[in-house]
């Protein structure tokens, strides 16, 4: 990178941390509103607001069901809300208008960061939530090369010295220069400002948006800096994630498990399984698996809207595999036509009978396993002969 060009601009940049009154009175009906010159964002549910007493002061990104990544200066004693456990994380689009608040129970900032660092890097923090988030986390990725377009999301103000924090906004920017830990972007014409600190730079990697940058400094007009997520992942972010608990039932929600953590099976963990008893609450599951009047066939647990296709004595026409709908060789009841007992006996030799011990139903065409007792088989043959005789009368 061209260090002289990048670092010559650092003295003019300010940290993007700000606390102001909640934006409940601000109109949000307009389709556009300045991150600076950005748009209102109703997506990216994993981008969150850091709040204290209901007021937004920074932004963050959910990277596991219980871990949020943000900026160090947001919770550092010299510049932000300290300790970080005083904060609450808000999930929603406008702070104070619906959404969900979750307490922070543990928070750390990278110890290498300090206010007057001439390198202006290591501005990273991590926060652990008291309970799993109601949305899916955003995966972390590697920073793309200069010239790449990335998406910026934050809850900050709309202009230098302006107002409007607490509303999620989105815009795009182009990566300019890249350092070992930070990268720069021009505000052209849009970018980050106060309150966007700790927020989210996303790169679309093979169709998946991944977190690649953490907003740190900006002059709200021409120049901005982000921390590289890939530069801090192995040394700082991942160790904090890993110490959050095991994948066993220990009262703590872990991430990166090979199977759903029993402490939070309905969390956004990449698994949609029967471990979550209510698939409609699992962000990894297709919403169609809930009771919505539509039968979805690829759910991990039976969709309550789908018919029950079991041997229960009732034929459900919508079930192709319902054993109660079996028609045998040529009609209902398994009779092949107007034959006599001799013909029926021949059919029985070709069509072995199994007695379903669970419901007492005769299921033709299935080999018994294990073999039924002789008296039970005899009873089944008698019942079938009587039923067939009646159907031929």
Image (cartoon, rainbow, N blue to C red):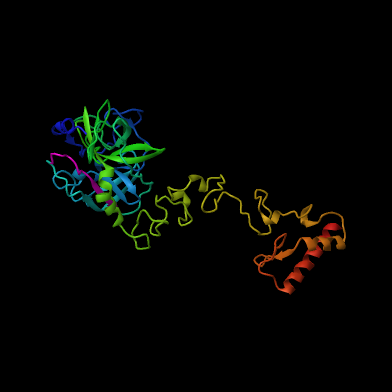
Q: Name the image quarter holding residue 334.
A: bottom right
Write the residue at 34% across / 32% down: 40
On the image, the x and y values in percent for residue 149 come to: 33, 31
Write the residue at 25% across / 28% down: 187
In the image, is residue 121 part of the stretch drawn in magenta?
Answer: yes
Q: Name the image quarter holding residue 124.
A: top left
Can the viewer see residue 251?
yes
- Where 16 sits versus 53, above or below? above
Number of marks present in the image shown: 0
Depth check, front residue: 298 or 160: 298
On the image, the x and y values in percent for residue 373 come to: 71, 73
- Where 387 sits versus 188, above or below? below
Pick out the residue farthest to the left: 116
Asked whether, in this view, residue 346 is left or right of residue 99, the answer is: right
Query: Quadrant where the N terminus lies?
Result: top left
Asked whether, in this view, residue 180 is left or right of residue 210, the answer is: left
Asked whether, in this view, residue 314 is left or right of residue 18, the answer is: right
Q: Main secondary structure of the magenta part?
A: loop
The segment highlighted magenta reads 117-129
On the image, the x and y values in percent for residue 225 come to: 22, 35
Can the viewer see residue 27?
no
- Where 264 sits versus 187, above or below? below
In the image, is residue 178 part of the stretch drawn in magenta?
Answer: no
Depth check, front residue: 92 or 62: 62
Pick out the residue farthest to the front: 1
On the image, the x and y values in percent for residue 96 come to: 30, 41
Query: Quadrant where the C terminus lies?
Result: bottom right
């Amino acid at each position: 990178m061209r260090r002289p060009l990048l670092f010559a601009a650092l003295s003019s940049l300010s940290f993007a941390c700000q606390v102001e009154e909640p934006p409940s009175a601000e109109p949000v009906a307009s389709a556009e509103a300045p991150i600076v010159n950005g748009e209102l964002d109703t997506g990216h549910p994993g981008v969150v607001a850091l709040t204290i007493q209901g007021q937004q002061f920074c932004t963050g990104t959910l990277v596991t069901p219980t871990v949020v990544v943000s900026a160090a200066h947001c919770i550092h004693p010299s510049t932000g809300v300290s300790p970080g456990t005083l904060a609450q994380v808000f999930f929603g689009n406008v702070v104070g208008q619906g959404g969900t608040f979750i307490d922070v129970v543990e928070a750390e900032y990278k110890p290498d960061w300090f206010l007057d660092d001439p390198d202006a890097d290591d501005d990273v923090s991590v926060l652990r939530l008291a309970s799993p988030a109601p949305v899916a986390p955003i995966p972390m990725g590697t920073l793309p090369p200069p010239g790449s377009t990335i998406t910026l999301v934050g809850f900050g103000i709309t202009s230098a010295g302006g107002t409007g924090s607490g509303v999620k906004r989105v815009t795009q920017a182009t990566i300019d220069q890249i350092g070992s830990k930070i990268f720069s972007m021009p505000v052209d014409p849009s970018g980050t400002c106060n309150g966007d600190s700790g927020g989210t730079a996303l790169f679309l990697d093979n169709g998946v948006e991944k977190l690649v940058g953490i907003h740190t400094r900006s002059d709200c007009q021409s120049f901005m800096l982000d921390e590289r997520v890939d530069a801090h992942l192995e040394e700082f972010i991942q160790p904090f994630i890993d110490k959050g608990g095991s994948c066993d039932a220990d009262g703590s929600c872990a991430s990166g498990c090979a199977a759903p953590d029993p402490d939070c099976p309905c969390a956004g963990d990449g698994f949609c399984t029967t471990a979550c008893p209510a698939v409609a609450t699992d962000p990894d599951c297709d919403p169609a698996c809930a009771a919505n009047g539509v039968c979805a066939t690829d759910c991990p647990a039976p969709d309550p809207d789908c018919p029950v296709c079991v041997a229960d004595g009732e034929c459900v026409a919508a079930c192709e595999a319902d054993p109660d709908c079996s028609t045998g060789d040529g009609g209902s009841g398994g009779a092949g036509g107007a034959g006599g007992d001799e013909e029926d006996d021949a059919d029985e030799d070709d069509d072995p009978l199994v007695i379903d011990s669970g419901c007492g139903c005769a299921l033709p065409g299935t080999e018994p396993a294990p073999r039924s007792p002789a008296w039970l088989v005899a009873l089944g043959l008698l019942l079938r002969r009587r039923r067939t005789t009646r159907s031929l009368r």
